[in-house]
Amino acid sequence: METRKVLSSLCYFSIFFAGFIFPLAVYLATGDKETKRHAKKSLLSHLIPLILTPLLVLAVFYDFTSQQDAIPVFTVISIIVMILLCLAVVIWNIVKGVKVLTAE
């Protein structure tokens, strides 16, 4: 198996073991354009859940400071959205990693 295929797929699969560190290291260390492209895509996909993290913090802050006795609806909705987004990102990374390995 080619080294670039393995590195490219490991960038996607690193969501399970190294987060965004492995794709960043591969992106900075490799000279191959195809591997660099896959490292960049996987790095961006690993960072997508971080975009919604401030929304979750804001929701918790808002719900627990303004509404003492009410159900924290904004927080619950934000948590559900975060879980669905993280699940979608994990599934997308698995699919892309397998596609890279099986590509000819």
Image: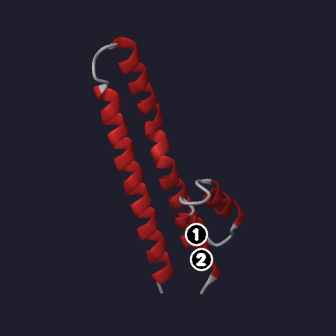
Q: CA distance from mark 2 to mark 1?
A: 6 Å
Q: Secondary structure at mark 1?
A: helix
Residue appearing at x 42%, y 50% in the figure: 86
Instruction: In the rendered view, tell whether residue 11 sits above or below residue 60.
Output: below
Q: Amino acid at mark 1?
A: Leu
Instruction: In the rendered view, tell whether residue 91 sits above or below residue 35.
Output: above
- The N terminus is located in which quarter? bottom right
Q: Which residue is mark 1?
A: 10
Instruction: In the rendered view, tell whether residue 71 sits above or below residue 38.
Output: above
Q: Are marks 2 and 1 in contact (CB under 8 Å)?
A: yes
Q: Position of residue 82 (x, y in %)?
A: 39, 43
Residue 76: quarter of image: top left
Q: Position of residue 50 (x, y in %)?
A: 50, 42
Residue 38: quarter of image: bottom right
Q: Position of residue 92 (x, y in %)?
A: 40, 62
Residue appearing at x 68%, y 59% in the figure: 25
Q: Secondary structure at mark 2?
A: helix
Relative placement, left or right, of 17 versus 90 is right
Residue 33: quarter of image: bottom right
Residue appearing at x 64%, y 54% in the figure: 21
Q: Which residue is mark 2?
A: 6
Relative placement, left or right, of 55 versus 11 is left
Q: Residue furthest front?
A: 69
Q: Badge 2, how many Cα within 10 Å: few under 14, some, many 20+? A: some
Q: Amino acid at mark 2?
A: Val
Residue appearing at x 61%, y 72% in the figure: 7
Nearer to us in this view, 90 or 99: 90
Q: Position of residue 27 (x, y in %)?
A: 64, 61
